[in-house]
């Protein structure tokens, strides 16, 4: 069973994603509300997959991605973003993110996560 860290400042989005992933056998090991908490929980729990929102308080998802990739260069991070953030998404992929999902359209999330192996 794959473990997942969901980092999003929206409780609604974390709950929505968590419920969808649990239906497909993923285990939500931790949640984070901001980039600092995401880095801390990644370091503490070492999840198999990180779903990382780009726009979060304190430190954003790009900052968190940089730090997570420094901790583990093989981390499987999927960025979640709203429409209109394409240049940021390209930057995230260059920094090591494996893919991205446009919120709130999660229809292909399970396919993306299963193709990470």
Image (spheres, rainbow, N blue to C red):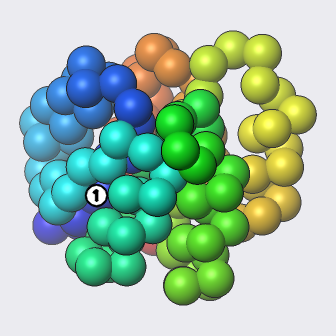
Residue 88 falls in image quadrant = top right
The foreground one among 36 and 46 is: 36
Q: Residues within 10 Å of mark 1 (few under 14, many from 20)?
A: many
Q: Is residue 69 above or below residue 56?
A: below
Asked whether residue 78 is in view, the answer is no
Q: Is residue 70 above or below residue 80?
A: below
Residue in the picture at 34% in, 24% down: 10
Percent of width and height locating residue 26: 18, 53
Residue 104 falls in image quadrant = top left
Percent of width and height locating residue 13: 32, 24
State the quadrant of the C terminus. Answer: bottom left
Q: Which residue lies most toward the right here?
A: 87
Q: Is residue 16 above or below residue 59?
A: above
Percent of width and height locating residue 106: 42, 23
SS state under label 1: strand
Q: Is residue 99 above or below residue 47?
A: above
Percent of width and height locating residue 98: 63, 58
Residue 66 falls in image quadrant = bottom right
The foreground one among 40 and 17 is: 40
The foreground one among 109 and 51 is: 51
In-image side of 61 versus 30 (left or right): right
Instruction: Return the residue at label 1.
Output: 4
Residue in the picture at 35% in, 41% down: 33
Residue in the picture at 28% in, 79% down: 44
Residue in the picture at 88% in, 34% down: 87
């Amino acid at each position: 069973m794959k473990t997942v860290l969901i980092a999003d400042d929206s409780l609604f989005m974390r709950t929505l994603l968590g419920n969808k992933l649990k239906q497909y056998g993923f285990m939500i090991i931790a949640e984070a509300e901001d980039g600092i908490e995401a880095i801390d929980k990644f370091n503490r729990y070492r999840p198999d997959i990180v779903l990382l929102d780009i726009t979060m308080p304190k430190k954003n998802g790009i900052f968190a991605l940089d730090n997570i990739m420094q901790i583990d260069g093989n981390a499987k991070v999927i960025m979640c973003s709203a429409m209109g953030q394409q240049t940021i998404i390209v930057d995230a992929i260059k920094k090591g993110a494996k893919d991205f999902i446009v919120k709130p359209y999660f229809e292909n999330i399970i396919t993306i996560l299963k193709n990470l192996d």
